[in-house]
Amino acid sequence: MKPIPYGRQHITDEDIAAVVETLKSDFLTQGPKIDEFERKFAEYVGAPYAVAVNNATSGLHIAAKALGVGPGTKVIVTPLTFAASANCIRYCGSDVTFCDINPDTYLMDAAKLEQILESHPAGTFSGIVIVDFAGYPHNLEQYREIADRHGLWIIEDACHAPGAWYTDSKGERQLTGNCRYADCTIFSFHPVKHIATGEGGMVTTAKPELLERLRLYRTHGITKDASKLEKNDGGWYYEMQDLGFNYRITDFQAALGISQLSRAEAGLERRQEIARRYDEAFKGNDKIKTPYRSEDVRHAFHLYVIKVPDRKALYDALRANGVMAQVHYVPLHLMPYYRQLGNAPGQLPVVEDYYEHCLSLPMYPTLTDEEQEYVIKQVLQHV
């Protein structure tokens, strides 16, 4: 059997045709496909506005900048994430404080977040960056209540969780990214994610003032909007009104995203099916801890993470047998860069214990039943 990766893209003939059609059109970038992708993605997650960018890191950066992150501010971030979730705060010159995770969901622990906030003077922190790790969504209603009491904004890194939802106190399903409670939500279109555009990302928001800043920072801080210009010399005229970036996505990437979006729900259903088969196969095995589940949450299952006693031995055995399991993630506070800023081993015991035992098994819609059975067999044989 060919090696089985932990994740992979799924490109169809329809995807290829959509890209080719755009390549033959008048626009390769800054054209109509970007607007269409933004509109359709906003509809998919239930958000009023969406801004497409060249990758999710760029989205995190301009979201932080739009929310006023800068020198003299402090932001609370989960340590269980890819580096970009914290780096976006450092790009803006702000300080990062890490909050430990919940031992069941692996999300930022709300009780420990409260402890951090209450142990510092009011106004110490300006916001929080939460991550819907592996595809399990935060209950944003709960975090919004905490944020409002302490005067904080919320950036939700939902790169793992398009299509996920949780149930609020009124019994209503809240889709990840609808921004009813978060100020900005960021998604990724990296090849291993639910929707692939090669590289790419999206920022959603419900606030018009944030939308305006996000669009400005995406394109060098430049606008041609006549209503916002200090003067107007003619149809060619534009103004750079702030220091922005070149974080634009291309039209052919947007065309691929639109095509991929059309089957996003089918991909999610397949991920649910794969997760159920793993759950059933490992049920009752006291050496394997499977992902936490809740009936009032839809887990998007970007990752299927198990915890085992000897992760290194299982990782090596699986790879030796063609199962390319992966580890997500080395806790950020343990990275040399963040240790230089005052973080140290031992300060976040839950995420450090998680890291010693976690392993991500293959999880993607085109994983076949035969391949999954092989993965299960190898895990049970070597755990």
Image: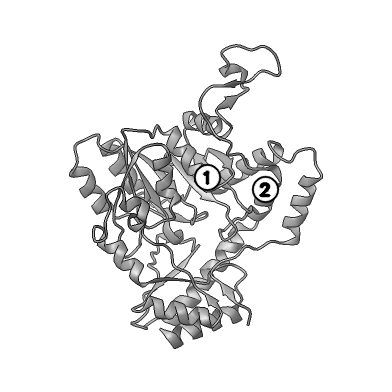
Quarter of the picture holding the N terminus? bottom right
Looking at the image, is 209 positioned above or below residue 94? above
Looking at the image, is 72 positioned above or below residue 166? above
Badge 1: few (under 14), some or many (20 or more) residues near its Cα, within 10 Å? some
Q: Nearer the viewer, residue 170 or 223?
A: 223
Tell me the SS state at disc 2: helix
Residue at (55% x, 62% y) in the render = 268
Looking at the image, is 146 positioned above or below residue 267? above
372 relative position to 260: left or right:
left
Asked if the residue under mark 2 is in contact with the one under mark 1, i.e. CB atoms within 8 Å, the reply is no
Labelled disc at residue 253: 2
51 relative position to 129: left or right:
right
368 relative position to 80: left or right:
right
In the image, residue 77 lies at what x, y percent?
Answer: 34, 48
Quarter of the picture holding the C terminus? bottom left
Q: Nearer the viewer, residue 330 or 11?
A: 330
In the image, residue 118 lies at what x, y percent?
Answer: 19, 43
Q: How is the image coloured?
A: one colour
Looking at the image, is 25 positioned above or below residue 13? above
Badge 2: few (under 14), some or many (20 or more) residues near its Cα, within 10 Å? many
Tell me the SS state at disc 1: loop
Task: Name the amino acid type tagged 1.
Answer: Gly
Residue at (49% x, 84% y) in the render = 378
Q: Which residue is mark 1?
A: 46
Labelled disc at residue 290: none
In the image, residue 44 lies at what x, y percent?
Answer: 57, 48
One can see residue 51 in this view: yes
Of labels 1 and 2, the one closer to you: 2
First reached walking from the N terminus: tag 1 or tag 2: 1
